[in-house]
Every structure is written in structure tokens, then in C-alpha cells.
Image: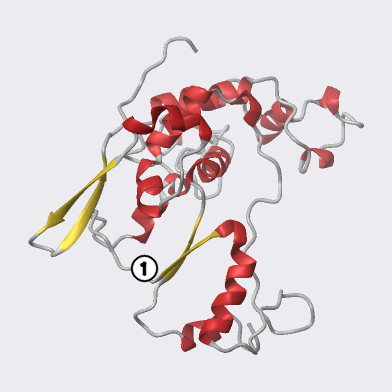
Amino acid sequence: VEPRGYKAVMEAMNADNIIAFVREPLSRFYSQYDEAYVRTAPWSNTQNPYYINPNNPQKTKKVHPFPFLYENLQSYQDYEDVFCPPSTRKNPNNRRECLFRPSQEDGTLAKRLDRFVQEYDGRDPYDVHLILQVPKLLSKNSDGTSVHITELYNTTNAENDWQLIAKKYIGQHAEFTKAGNGKKGGKVIEGRSYPRRFDKSLVSRETERRICLLALLDYCCLNFPLPSSCEEDVKGLSCTMDYDDERGAVRVQPGVFPDVARVNAF
């Protein structure tokens, strides 16, 4: 936004106006999982309580709640060799092409995702990237009471929406410009620029239906339609609303709280 970017919008907006950008819950869950997978991997030593020092494994701060995710993987290179096998590369010794290639995994990672989704109940996220969107938008008490949001936008159309926001609060002359073009402009934060590491086509419909259950609060409160894989169970996927007289606010809760479903088939 010319000339002061994001701050210009914030200064022009009334303090009572609250805007938020949200994302389709199923797609977001896949990204959340990919991010949490790498950040909490035993080889990742950056702000990771589950890091295992190969020289002193006894000093690990926490035991990972889902250690099976990393079975037979000792390093990022081992992980990379699963979604980008050396035999599929033009040069087996060159890892650069793995960064932006679609996953070539054989189902190993997809099966581990399937098992994770069945065993994860969503109530105690072990990594910040697994937190749903609605709890992040709630009050500091995170007690389930609703908050007033003036405008809600979808991240898939973020750049065009920021254009509309700029014109609405600054004026029709406002122009949203990307950083790096020689002007002091704002820049839309872009999402992932690399493919998923698991093969999404190998993820079962049962897994997608349970993800809908895990992300039910986001689907209800943000009014996203359920994906086709979850429509069959639409009657079982609903939320409840009640009124808290003491707080004077509406409380929204999932109609179903997912239980841990231990699956012995893996």
C-alpha cells in the first residue's frame, strides 16, 4: 500500500475493525502436518524439545509423542531420500532437484500420516503449527467465547483482498505493491513454495474424514464447506452453540470430540 504499506492500512482503520485471513482447513492441516513433521523431527536442533543429540541421546528434553513418524530416519537426508529417492533423480548425488519436485515417495510417508491422524486427538497440539485457526482468533482466555471480527478473508485470494482493503480504508488511489520493485510497498506473505513431501493421492478418504473431524471447529466457525471426502458423514460433523450468561457471549464447541483411535493395522 503506497506509501507506508501495512501501517497505512492499520492507521486508517478504526480500532473496532478487526480483519483476519483464514484458510480451508483440510488443505491447511496438510501444511500444518508437513511443517510440524520437520520442525519436531529428532534431527532438527532449532527450538525443538524433541531433538535427539546423536552424541548424547540421553539428554533429550522430551520424548516425541509420535515416534513412529521417524522410524528408520536418522537425518533430513534420510527423509529426503524417501520423498525424492536417488534412483528417481537425474543425478543421484544432486539433492537440489528434490526441493521443488513433486513427491516420489512409495506410500511410506502417506501411511505414517494416516496413522498419525488416527492416533492424534487434536486436544493438545505438541507443536504450534498444529493449532487450529479459531483458537488463535479467540480471546486470550481461549475459553471458547466468540469474538467480533469485522472482515474475514480467504488466503487463496490474499493479494486481491489486500487491494480491496487498501482502497476501502485509504482511498481509491491506494495501490498495493509488491516489495522488491523499487517502491516502498507492502507484500503479501506467500504460502508454501514447495510440494508436499507425502503423496496426497495416497492418503485415504478415511483419513480425510477424520481430519475434518479434527478441524471441525474451523469448518463450523469459519463457514467453510466440507470437502467432498467428508460430505458422506455431514450429519455427524456439526457444532453446538450455547449462551454464557456470565460472560454475555456465545460459546461454540464441536458437536463431537474425536477420541484417539488406536489402529493396529500399521
* The one of 116 and 23 positioned closer to us in this rendering: 23
Q: Is residue 13 left or right of residue 190?
A: left
Name the foreground residue: 205 vs 143. Answer: 205
* Furthest residue toward left: 246
Q: Position of residue 13 (x, y in %)?
A: 44, 84
Q: For mark 1, does the 10 Å Cα neighbourhood hold few (<14), some (14 to 19), or many (20 or more) residues?
A: few
**Could you say where residue 113 lies in the image, as x and y percent from the top left?**
53, 27
Give the vertical position of 215 relative to 73 (above or below). Answer: below
Q: Where, by quadrant of the figure, is residue 248 drawn?
A: bottom left
Camera sees residue 131: yes
At x 61% / y 20%, what residue is drawn? 72
Q: Is residue 84 above or below residue 183?
A: above
Q: Position of residue 64 (x, y in %)?
A: 44, 32
Give the residue type that dot 1 points to.
Answer: Ile
Q: Quadrant of the N terminus?
A: bottom right
Quarter where residue 200 is shown? top right
- Image quadrant where residue 66 sits: top left
**Of 157 and 96, which appears nearest the observer?**
157
245 sits to left or right of 258: left
